[in-house]
């Protein structure tokens, strides 16, 4: 069955159609919903009826304008929960919307594909934007000339393999302070002081499983280690939860060469002149070497 079969059904004059939509989260979980009064299996995904989720009219346009719509729903423990929304598990989740012949679910047509945008909550109700595939075209694309590296450690431009021994560690949470911003470990050696600073932390178990956050500071004192996060996780972290920590990169050329032995993939311009050079002007007796400007004489003094 295909969209052509649905066209034939729609041209018959008496239709049995409904909408079905599928949400695929970043962690791989796929949820299916339908506004039909019975559950349907569409493209191998069970789309549940009565889940409390509905979709508003879809606005589709030609050209490069953004398709958009909204999804509304009531929070339900069996479907979309308040805890998962608060934890950001639905941020940028992929959404596909189908028009389906509920009497013959194989006859269907995809009418929208995109991702979830802003999610707002009011009491037991939530509202989320549906953003079309052309949404990324509104974002600026390009790279800036900077002294520091513009790549993200471990991405396709950096090409560094974080799975190498010595660049990640797994530890269970021991002590938590400052509402989850500070993690303390009584014995956490094998890595230099500030090794994980600027790195990433991923939660492997517990209520916050799958969530990640950046490390603000990493201090080693004797055998004890204190790690401070830039922001709290949007789900509760508890003692005993397993974490994976990745080494941090401060974007400097020296760190790329010494810490990671990856200078061939450095994506910065360490010899880029500073702002003082850009504002330099020709002057007799001053060598134009490209270095820092000499301190100008006091007003009224002889040059």
Image (tube, rainbow, N blue to C red):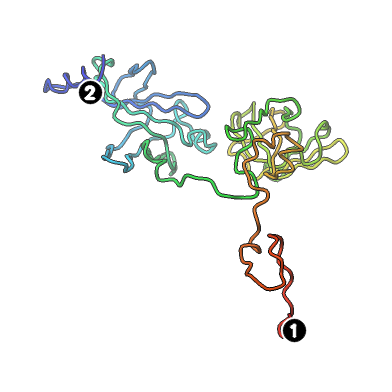
Question: In the orientation shown, which residue stands out farthest toward the left?
Answer: 13
In this rendered view, identify the residue nearer to me: 31 or 221.
221
In this rendered view, identify the residue nearer to me: 296 or 15.
296
- Decide: is 166 above or below 44: below
Q: Is residue 87 left or right of residue 246?
A: left
Residue at the disc numbered 2: 17
Question: In the orientation shown, which residue stands out farthest toward the front?
Answer: 284
Q: Is residue 225 left or right of residue 148?
A: right
Residue at 64% x, 30% y: name it. 203
* Mark positioned earlier in the residue sequence (1 or 2): 2
Dot 1 falls on a residue whose secondary structure is: loop
Residue at the disc numbered 1: 301
Dot 2 falls on a residue whose secondary structure is: strand
Rendered location of residue 51, percent (x, y): 38, 27
Crowdedness near tag 1: few (<14), some (14–19) or many (≥20) residues, C-alpha within 10 Å: few
Rendered location of residue 218, percent (x, y): 76, 42
Give the position of the N terminus as an image quadrant.
top left
Based on the displayed image, in which of its 4 quarters is residue 160 positioned? top right
Based on the displayed image, in which of its 4 quarters is residue 158 positioned? top right
In this rendered view, identify the residue nearer to me: 262 or 1.
262
Based on the displayed image, in which of its 4 quarters is residue 131 positioned? top left
Viewer can see residue 72: no
Rendered location of residue 103, percent (x, y): 23, 15
């Amino acid at each position: 069955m295909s969209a052509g079969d649905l066209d034939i059904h729609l041209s018959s004059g008496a239709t049995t159609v409904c909408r079905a939509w599928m949400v695929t989260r970043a962690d791989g979980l796929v949820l299916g919903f339908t506004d039909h009064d019975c559950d349907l299996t569409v493209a191998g995904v069970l789309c549940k009826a009565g889940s409390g989720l509905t979709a508003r009219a879809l606005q589709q346009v030609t050209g490069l304008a953004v398709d958009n719509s909204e999804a509304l729903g009531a929070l339900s423990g069996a479907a979309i929960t308040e805890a998962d929304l608060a934890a950001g598990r639905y941020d940028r989740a992929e959404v596909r919307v189908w028009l389906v012949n509920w009497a013959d679910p194989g006859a269907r047509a995809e009418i929208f594909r995109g991702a979830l945008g802003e999610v707002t909550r009011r009491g037991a109700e939530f509202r989320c934007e549906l953003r079309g595939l052309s949404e990324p075209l509104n974002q600026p694309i390009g790279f800036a000339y900077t002294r520091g590296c513009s790549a993200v450690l471990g991405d396709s431009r950096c090409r560094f393999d974080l799975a190498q021994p010595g660049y990640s560690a797994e530890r269970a949470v021991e002590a938590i302070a400052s509402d989850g911003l500070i993690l303390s470990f009584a014995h956490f050696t094998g890595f230099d002081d500030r090794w994980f600073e600027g790195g990433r932390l991923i939660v492997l178990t517990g209520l916050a499983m799958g969530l990640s956050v950046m490390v603000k500071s990493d201090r080693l004192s004797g055998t004890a280690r204190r790690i401070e996060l830039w922001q709290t996780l949007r789900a509760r972290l508890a003692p005993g939860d397993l974490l994976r920590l990745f080494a941090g990169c401060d974007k400097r050329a020296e760190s790329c060469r010494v810490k990671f032995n990856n200078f061939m993939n450095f994506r910065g311009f360490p010899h880029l002149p500073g702002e003082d050079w850009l504002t330099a002007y020709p002057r007799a007796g001053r060598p134009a070497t490209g270095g820092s400007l000499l301190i100008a004489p006091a007003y009224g003094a002889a040059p």
